[in-house]
Image (tube, coloured by chain):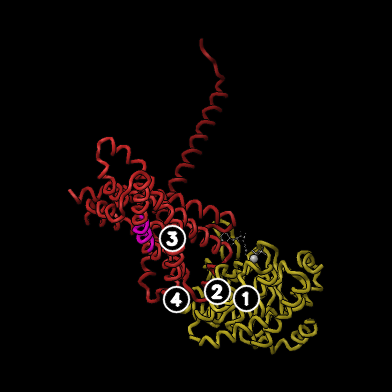
Amino acid sequence: MKTEQTESVLLDSPKKSTKEPVIEINGLYKSFGNQEVLKNLSFKLFDGENLVVLGKSGSGKSVLIKCIVGLLRSDSGIINVFDQNVLTLKRKELDDVRQKIGFLFQSGALYDSMTVKENLEFPLKRMEKQLKQKEIDEKIIEALENVGLPEVLNKMPSELSGGMRKRISLARTIVVDPMIMLYDEPTTGLDPVTSDEISSLINDIQKKYKTSSIIITHDIECARMTADRLIMLQDGEVYEQGNLNKFEKSTDLIIRAFFK
Amino acid sequence: MKIIIPVKRAKEIALHHTIKLSEKTLAKTKEAHNFLTDFADVILFIARLIRETFSRKFEVREFFHQCFNIGYKSLPLISVTGTIMGLVLTIQSRPVLANFGAETLLPGMVAISLIREMGPVITGLICAGKIASGMGAELGSMKVTEQIEAMEVSSTHPMRFLVVTRVWAATLMIPLLILYADALGIIGSWIGANIKGDVSFVLFFSQAFKNIDFLDFIPAVVKSFFFGAVIGIVGCYKGYNAGRGTESVGKAANSAVVLASLLVLIVDMIAVQVTDMLVK
Ligand SMILES: Nc1ncnc2c1ncn2[C@@H]1O[C@H](COP(=O)(O)OP(=O)(O)OP(=O)(O)O)[C@@H](O)[C@H]1O
Ligand SMILES: [Mg+2]
């Protein structure tokens, strides 16, 4: 599993710190009405790493990654993605940034009026760069094979099980070869076997496409398998960050509640 | 007899009523405030809609897809209601006209009322029920299940892709559906006339159209476009602005039907007034 790897990351951490941050968040605030969800949140995502974000339900994890892609506007703070501040970008520039980011929604968000194939075609046909139909078909097949579901091409999302839907939406996310992946609870609601498959898939994607990822999860097994580094959100702030070892050995009650 | 209330109690009662009253005022102001912000939202929505319509990229494919959805897929329903409309109108008016010995006026009268009023309004209301609620539910569920956000991160402008196409498709297709309903209404009327008596279709048709001129058609067609726009805008607005829970999908669909039907009638009333003024 990943433990040896995190150890080695720890050993050559000087090298790690020279890596460029691809996402840099500084002093982020976001509230809905008078409910403050994110308060002075700051962290970095480095090139090529898997960053796991832990936090209990309602702690603002989904809100955080929606702010990163500009789906929600934060009240103040800086969100730099590839050195561009998302908050100040124009629509067109924001679209360019978004093309480099894959977003796996917590609910899957498959278009339920379209078949699986059309679902996967959608982001490809919407890209700046126009692809030929043949290339599109190849990419779709490859993505479906990556998630282990090549046979459902012509089904409607409503005909799939919850786990299958999750995997198809993962396929739709990776089909555009993003440089950054944002996973919102990729394994929630799946059986342990499928969860493990998805977790290794996340690792495969990281290796194969050299992506940097933020993985939001409650699933500690998934965190153990995928994390290079973890951060924990509590009350809209970063409560703790570090590698897996630090979290596993922590005596803090809130952290222990996750790592039972 | 005097009723004596202790001062303390009187104060309590007074206080109680003042609180009740201020609560009520507060609720009323809130209501008014909500209504005003809603209204402002709608205006903004329409402004955005117009701006997006004339943006560089119009989603042509999706527009035709929606025309197909709204127009073609409503044909069976509109056929049935159109025919019934003409049939019923004929059967109901015949005895009255017969009393005056004016049965020959039947085709013309039915045609005029169909084209001027019954066709547009009844078809408009049916479309409000079918199309506005469909849009409200569809966009509402897309909103709740994050599909609209998913589109947005795939560099697709949801307003352009989902709303502009639907509103324009409704604006263009609903007038066509209304004309189609008018035509079937006249056929239904001929069927009704044939239940008692034997009229050839050609004769019936020529009698029907003898009494109709251009001035009957134009206002009806013009208001049909407004019906279409109202239905499209209300359906999309309600769906696109649905809340976050699943129950808001139902709410969106429901309030879309109610508001769209109401607005169809209001637009009709205004249209009738305006036509009346212009024709004089
Ligand atoms: N669009 C919104 N409007 C109003 N409140 C919102 C909105 N989005 C999120 N919230 C609120 O922000 C808080 C954080 O929500 P968020 O979805 O980020 O939680 P989460 O950490 O992802 O939880 P979970 O693990 O259950 O998914 C919640 O209290 C939620 O009610
Ligand atoms: Mg969440």
Q: Which residue is mark 4?
A: A90
Q: Which chain is yellow?
A: A
SS assignment at label 4: loop
- Which residue is denoted by mark 2 in the rendering? A69
Q: CA distance from mark 3 to mark 1?
A: 44 Å
Q: Main secondary structure of the magenta part?
A: helix
Q: Tell me the residue at 31%/54% (across/down).
A: B201
Ligand 1 is within 8 Å of the C-beta of the residue at disc 3: no
User: The numbered mark 4 sits on a residue in which chain?
Assistant: A
Mark 3 is surrounded, within 10 Å at the Cα level, by few (under 14), some (14 to 19) or many (20 or more) other residues, namely: some
Which residue lies at the image location 49% right of the left edge and 35% below the top edge?
Answer: B21
Residue stretch in magenta: B173-181
Question: Pointers 1 and 2 in contact (CB under 8 A)?
Answer: yes
Residues at circles 2 and 3 in contact by the CB criterion of under 8 Å: no
Q: Is residue B273 left or right of residue A92?
A: left
Q: Element under label 1?
A: strand
The chain coloured red is: B
> Horizontal placement of B161 versus B248: left or right?
left
- The residue under the point 33% across, 53% down is B186
- Across and down, in percent, residue A61 comes to 64, 67
Hey, which quadrant is residue A1 in on the image?
Answer: bottom right
Q: Which residue is mark 1?
A: A182
Q: CA distance from mark 3 to mark 4?
A: 43 Å
How far is mark 4 from mark 2, CA to CA? 13 Å
Q: Is residue A109 above or below residue B80?
A: below
Callout 3 amino acid: Leu
Calculate the distance from the C-alpha at mark 4 to the C-alpha at mark 1: 22 Å
